[in-house]
Amino acid sequence: MKRQVDNNTYLKYLLQSLTVDELKQVCRDFQIKGFSKFKRADLFNFILDTLAEEEIEETIEQKELGIISKEITSAIKKINGEDRETITEIKIINPKNHEIEIIFSGFNWKVGSFLSITPNNIKDPERDCDCRVGSNMGFCSHFWVGLILSLKEGYFSLKDWTLTELPENFEEIISPIRISTPHSGAESATASNKRQLIDESSDSAGLVKYINSSISIYEGEILNIVEKQSEFQGNISVYYQITLKNVRLGPRIARKSDYREDDIITVKELNVRISEKLQNDNQLKKKDKIKVNGKLDKDSFSGIMVKNIRKVQKL
């Protein structure tokens, strides 16, 4: 099936992913003059108004797959917890209309992305995003996370997708990705309506499903201890970042009877953060084996780390 969106509109969608330098290079490629005076927001219309129809077709042919592949790669990294932004919440707003909202969090920012793919709008789905690319109908990485989620929810079939080209291995890339509900011990009953995307082919798949959840580290051997400082509102606090190896962890449970061996995963290395007081009280050192409870967190500064630890038990 052929794309039903006209070339002019479609190229404008694609160009949203390009930087100012990349947009100016498009002008140079077609020997367009007078582009240097324009800011990024004005370059889109300038390019589209200047290019002939056959040049627009040529630009789509040259740029489309590269732009889309790059954004899809970024989307997969977000799903795997390997990007500077993490998926912190997935909401099915209206199942009947396939309306989904996904919240992404960075170090000190949040991005909300909306998508609705239905039989009536699949030729150009209803979408919106807080990011620069998606707010102008571009195919941002947040859009592709939403599209993958919509596929996994069964909201549409790839055979009906005509809006964009897709990498040849797209189905292979997304095949290991599944929808999961977070493990959060006693909280699981209230979290059952929440969703997570898990890429089971990823090295971090086991950890990703526990991000933003309370966990228990049943055993981990200290590989390294580093003293660090953080500043908040002018106050400096000391903490210790500990790297554990051969870590056994699972969801934090309220009762021993809730323990399930199937929930336990083993991780080669994992960072945990403890307070200065905890370190002073326990005098932890390399090769010590410890057990802790905390919250598995992920941010662009620290990566995946266990925080909010109140007690350390030596084994």
Image (cartoon, rainbow, N blue to C red):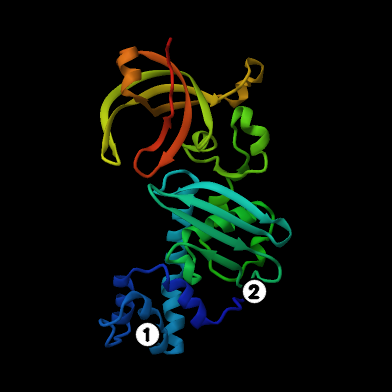
**What is the number of the mark on residue 1?**
2
Few, some or many C-alpha atoms within 10 Å of disc 1 (few <14, some 14-19, many ≥20)? some
Left or right: 195 in relation to 313: right
Q: Earlier in the sequence, mark 2 or mark 1?
A: 2
Instruction: Assign a secondary structure to mark 1.
Output: helix
Q: Which residue: 29% across, 86% down?
A: 31
Q: Which residue: 46% across, 70% down?
A: 64
Q: Is residue 103 above or below residue 263?
A: below
In the rendered view of the protein, which quadrant contains the C terminus?
top left
* Residue 76 in picture, x, y percent from top left: 48, 50
At label 2, the amino acid type is Met
Of 116 and 170, the residue lying toward us: 116
Q: Is residue 244 visible?
A: yes
C-alpha gap between disc 2 and disc 1: 30 Å
Left or right: 72 in relation to 186: left
For residue 224, what is the image quadrant? top left
Q: Which residue: 48% across, 44% down?
A: 80
**What is the number of the mark on residue 46?**
1
